[in-house]
Amino acid sequence: MNDPILSTDHDDGGTAFRPLYVTRVTVEGGSSAHGRATGRAGSSDGALDLELRMPAELGGDATGPNPEQLFAAAYASCFHGALSLVARQHLLDPAPITVEVSVTFGRDPADGGYQLRADLVVTWPGVEQDMAAPLLAEAAALCPYARMTSQGIPATINLAP
């Protein structure tokens, strides 16, 4: 059964952004000497509360999740949801679908700063490539994480008063 809020059957095609959900996560504490976030990440509703740690490859102790892992999890779960919706709309079983996202943190050759790369791989047993390709494209058009990685998103950066 499709959730009426998230079903594309109920899209109104309006021209204004219509918020459906807002979350807030705060990161505080931790060491900043290395220029990477460690410390505690917590959501305003308390559902997320974890210690961020540096990956061993960057000199950390790897005793907790890092931002790239959290982004990979969010991207994979969002794309999985979008593809599952598309599969159901095409009367296909989404149960065997798995989505793996690799996020790579590295140097941007253009300016020496940092850059992320995200690569997504779908495993869908029983569905041939020629049938899957347009469904993956449809899911990518629905998934805001896929759109963000290909097009960017509106964003602001402000200093709190």
Image (cartoon, rainbow, N blue to C red):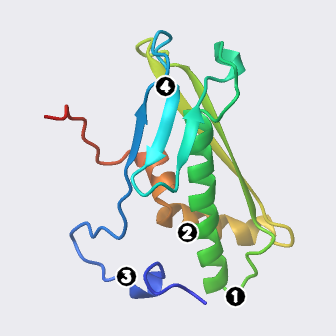
x%, y% of residue 83? Answer: 63, 69
Q: In the rendered structure, which disc, 1 or 3, sits on the residue that comes first in sequence?
A: 3
Whole-percent x, y for residue 91 in the image: 69, 88
The quarter of the picture where residue 136 lies is bottom right
Q: Quadrant of the rendered structure where residue 54 is? A: top right
* Amino acid type of the residue that numbered disc 1 sits on in the rendered structure: Leu
Q: CA distance from mark 3 to mark 4?
A: 38 Å
Question: Mark 2 vs mark 4: which is more N-terminal?
Answer: 4
Q: Could you give the CA–CA distance between mark 1 and mark 3, rounded to whole angstroms?
A: 20 Å
- Disc 3 target residue: 11
Judge the density around disc 1: few (<14), some (14-19), many (≥20) Cα neighbours within 10 Å. Answer: few
Residue ID for mark 1? 91
Q: Which residue occupies 76% across, 81% down?
A: 93
Q: CA distance from mark 1 to mark 4?
A: 43 Å
Element type at marker 1?
loop
Q: In the displayed structure, would residue 52 be above or below residue 1? A: above
Distance, label 2 to label 3, CA atoms, is 15 Å
Q: Secondary structure at mark 2?
A: helix
In the picture, measured across the screen, residue 20 lies left or right of residue 138, that is left
Dot 4 alpha-carbon crowd within 10 angstroms: few under 14, some 14 to 19, many 20 or more: some
> Mark 3 or 4, which is nearer the eye?
4
The residue sitting at 39% across, 53% down in the picture is: 44
Q: Which mark is residue 37?
A: 4
